[in-house]
Amino acid sequence: MKGLLHSNFIIFKDNILGSLLVILFVAVIGVLENSHLNVILLAISTFPILYMSYCQRETVANWNKLEKIMPIRANTVVLSKYVCFLLFIGIGCFVVGIYALINMIIGVMIWEPFLISLFLLVLGLHISIGAFFYPLSYKMDNGESQLIALMVAIILSTVLLYLTVQVGMVILELEHIFEIIEYPSFGIVYAIGMIVLFIFSYFIAQKIYAKKEF
């Protein structure tokens, strides 16, 4: 699996550096204007979307068929996709952490309750997109279908987030949907729930991939 992870990062090296430069530009503006939301959303969203688009291009190039005949266990192939996805999300979290640290050094605390909540909600949203995307992608054969799988995953994740927020509003006795971002504890519960969903998704994807014939 180490080789698969290494190859992914080698392929993405230029894309990662390019994305970091864009985020750096937005971060400078954020520091100067004391506006941090765009930086957080961009940093946490860029890298997982980048990786899922790469998975779609892999299918177009028939790399998944080559993986199937390589002397690599099926669960290792699937696990490498899930681990790499988490690593790319980790890059975004690391960038957000560095940005927050720089602001702290210059005397600015960016972690207001609503920003913490939005960070956790967006983080959980992307994890859930990955959780839906991989099982769906292994059910489909070509690049066009992979794009559909990504779109369906985004729709399902958005609906799941909306339903979760509705449940949270009932539990917290809130009247307006945007009030939920004032409760970071809700974001924590949501993010943890999506991590559990992501783990469960891995076992489903593993079974689908093991039975799949290319």
Image: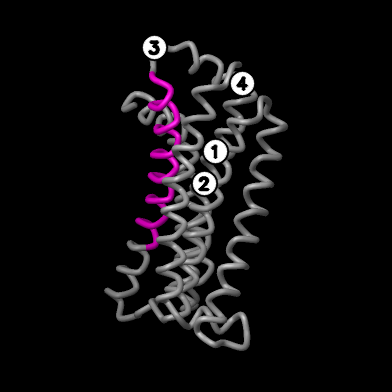
Q: Is the magenta region chiefly helix, strand or loop?
A: helix
Tell me if mark 3 has few (under 14), some (14-19) or many (20+) residues whose alpha carbon lies within 10 angstroms of its own. Answer: few
Q: Residue at x 36, y 29 (%)?
A: 6
Give the Cα distance between marks 1 and 2. Answer: 6 Å
Q: Secondary structure at mark 1?
A: helix
Q: Amino acid at mark 1?
A: Tyr
Comes first in the chain, label 1 or label 4 = 4
Where's the C terminus, which quadrant? top right
Q: Residue at x 60, y 74 (%)?
A: 166
Tell me where residue 84 sits by quadrant.
Answer: top left
Residue holding disc 3: 71
Give the Cα distance between marks 3 and 4. Answer: 19 Å
Tag shown at residue 104 = none
Residue holding disc 1: 134
State whether residue 205 is above or below residue 132. Answer: above
Q: Amino acid at mark 2?
A: Ala
Front residue of 116/23: it is: 116
Q: Position of residue 134 (x, y in %)?
A: 54, 38
Tag shown at residue 131 = 2
Give the Cα distance between marks 4 and 2. Answer: 23 Å
Residues drawn in magenta:
73-96
Q: Amino acid at mark 3?
A: Pro
Mark 1 touching mark 2, by CB under 8 A?
Answer: yes
Residue holding disc 4: 61
Give the Cα distance between marks 3 and 2. Answer: 26 Å
Q: Residue at x 52, y 14 (%)?
A: 66
Q: Secondary structure at mark 4?
A: loop
